[in-house]
């Protein structure tokens, strides 16, 4: 009797979790649609492109954080560093490219060189990203960021990460049904939205 009750509770629990995930996905779709529509109506195409650029950068940073926590994946997340470099909104990019970024990069390099035991592994990619922002030549930082080349690099990175994630999950359907797979899948799909949109309207 106890085993049957436990199986019933387990089945009910799984169906509740599945319905909760479906409800969250539907809410996310409705909210994202309304937000994109309002951004487009408020400021036109340029405003929606800026919004998508910020959203893509946020998604890339979110994926970096997920990978550095206990939700580790087999993705090559170091590719998110150039993605963030090319998709970071201009104001944030120039903020970190200035004196603040130079200070952060200097401290990171000193810590890594002279105190490697006090430099945690999870700071490797953020430190590399700040260092890239600071030392990148103007050709990359200005010309390629505001060009179709940067968009093509972002699109290639997004497609590669999506393909690798689907392969690691065991198929497209599994990438949405696994326990931690849905957050990674949605984050990677958000990576594809900005470069696709920007390439279409340019």
Image: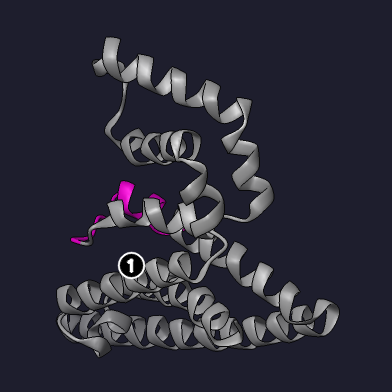
Mark 1: give few (<14), some (14-19) or many (20+) Cα within 10 Å: many
Q: Is residue 69 visible?
A: no
Location of the N terminus by quadrant is bottom left
Q: Is residue 46 visible?
A: yes
Q: Quadrant of residue 110?
A: top left
Relative horizontal placement of residue 165, taking residue 15 as reference (left or right): left
- Bounds of the magenta segment: 62-74
Q: How is the image coloured?
A: one colour
Q: In the image shown, does 162 or 46 lie closer to the viewer?
A: 46
Q: Check disc 1 and report its element: helix, strand or loop.
A: helix
Q: What percent of the width, then of the height, locates residue 45?
A: 73, 81
Q: What percent of the width, then of the height, locates residue 120?
A: 30, 28
**Residue 70 falls within the magenta-colored stretch:** yes
- Residue at 42% across, 77% down: 189
- Tally of marks: 1
Q: Is residue 77 above or below residue 183?
A: above
Relative horizontal placement of residue 183, taking residue 75 as reference (left or right): right
Location of the C terminus by quadrant is bottom right
- Residue at 53% across, 25% down: 102
Q: What percent of the width, then of the height, locates residue 115?
A: 29, 12
Relative horizontal placement of residue 10, taking residue 131 as reference (left or right): left
Q: In the image shown, does 33 or 41 lie closer to the viewer?
A: 41
Q: What percent of the width, then of the height, locates residue 196?
A: 49, 81
Please identify the residue farthest to the right as the structure is shown.
42
Please identify the residue farthest to the top as the structure is shown.
114
Q: Quadrant of residue 114?
A: top left
Q: Quadrant of residue 136?
A: top left
Q: Which residue is mark 1?
A: 157
- Residue at 42% across, 59% down: 83
Relative horizontal placement of residue 27, taking residue 127 as reference (left or right): right
Q: Is residue 188 above or below residue 101?
A: below
């Amino acid at each position: 009797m106890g085993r049957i009750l436990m199986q019933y509770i387990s089945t009910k629990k799984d169906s509740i979790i599945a319905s909760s995930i479906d409800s969250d996905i539907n809410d996310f779709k409705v909210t994202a649609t309304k937000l994109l529509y309002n951004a487009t109506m408020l400021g036109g195409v340029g405003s929606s492109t800026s919004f998508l650029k910020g959203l893509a950068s946020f998604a890339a940073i979110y994926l970096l954080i997920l990978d550095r926590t206990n939700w580790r994946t087999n993705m090559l997340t170091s590719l998110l560093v150039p993605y963030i470099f090319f998709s970071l909104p201009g104001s944030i990019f120039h903020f970190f490219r200035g004196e603040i970024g130079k200070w952060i990069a200097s401290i990171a390099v000193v810590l890594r060189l002279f105190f490697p035991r006090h430099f945690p592994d999870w700071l490797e990619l953020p430190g590399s990203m700040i260092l890239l922002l600071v030392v990148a030549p103007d050709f990359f930082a200005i010309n390629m960021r505001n060009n179709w080349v940067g968009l093509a690099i972002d699109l290639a990175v997004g497609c590669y990460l999506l393909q690798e994630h689907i392969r690691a999950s065991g198929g497209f359907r599994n990438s949405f049904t696994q326990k931690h797979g849905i957050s990674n899948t949605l984050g990677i799909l958000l990576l594809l939205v900005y470069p696709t949109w920007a390439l279409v309207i340019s």
